[in-house]
Image (cartoon, rainbow, N blue to C red):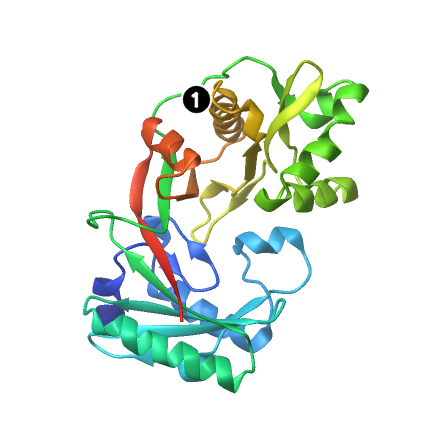
Amino acid sequence: MFFRWDWLRARLTAPIVPTLGPVHPDALSIDLFEDVLRAASTGGFLPYDKDRRWGGEKDEQVLREDVVHQPQYTLVPTLNRRGRGTVKVFAYGAPDSVVAEAAELAAKLAAVHDVAGARVVRPLGPGTDAPRGTRIQLKDFTVGLCPAPGGPVRPVTDWPTDVRKTFAPFAEAMAADGLAFLHTRMQTGRCGPVLAAAVEGRIVGAIGPMEVRPDAIARPQLMPQYFAVLPESRGHGTGRLLWRAAMHWGQRHGAAYQLLQTEVGGPSDKLCQSEGLVSLGFRHTTHV
């Protein structure tokens, strides 16, 4: 094995694995880190990679020859060729100096691989003072029921034709939240159902796709969704209604949990916090 678990485990302040993103704390192991190194040599998806559902090729790979693994810290650089390209260095370690070393490595590798972006990704523990970046939250479906919320929410395909036709302009308006991409996947029939809320015959919010897949230890996980509500329709409980409908769907379809990533202080973050989700830590990204 390349990694030493006794070196790495104490530095994993949040359950974030390069190229995989957040994972359930129970699934966090040295095997996951070894797997991402093996995947780097094939260019393929790991069986439990959340991005595998979209098909195609894996965009991000670990630069295995440039990994720095020491007792006090570990630096894992990745390369993404999408667009103008980005190098990220995942910095695991307590000393503040680890960020400076990670930034230096990111800048060097960005130049070597001729890409435009260089970033440092720092996992931070759930007890971090003045948290920033992205919060990682856990919804555990094995604790308590997730009742159907009622209200004007149903799968897009279950709405009448005239309502369904309003999904395209809604998706275009919310392209920045990934809904335009989701719409293209829906049109090819290559994703699970999408739940939508409609008001006065027009779709104003959506969450999806709804899919359950096994994680690295074969536990059923409700996969991440795209989630958006039109700005003019916010403040009326539509987002909470959609989110609760999604959680009901996940529990009813056998999911054990879902991991959510929310921008600290944003609307989704406040929603999840008010719904009692467990915070697992933070992901803070610095542009070099």
Give 255 or 197, whichever is nearer the viewer: 197
Element type at marker 1? loop
Amino acid of disc 1: Cys
Q: Position of residue 33 (x, y in %)?
A: 39, 67
Badge count: 1
Q: Position of residue 244 (x, y in %)?
A: 47, 24
Residue where numbered disc 1 is placed: 146
Q: Residue at x 66, y 33 (%)?
A: 193
Left or right: where 152 falls relative to 36: right
Q: Residue at x 60, y 67 (%)?
A: 44
Residue 168 sits above or below residue 145 on the image: below
Image quarter (top left, top right, bottom left or bottom right) of the N terminus: bottom left
Q: Residue at x 53, y 56 (%)?
A: 49
Left or right: where 105 falls relative to 44: left
Left or right: where 27 falls relative to 49: left
Image quarter (top left, top right, bottom left or bottom right) of the C terminus: bottom left
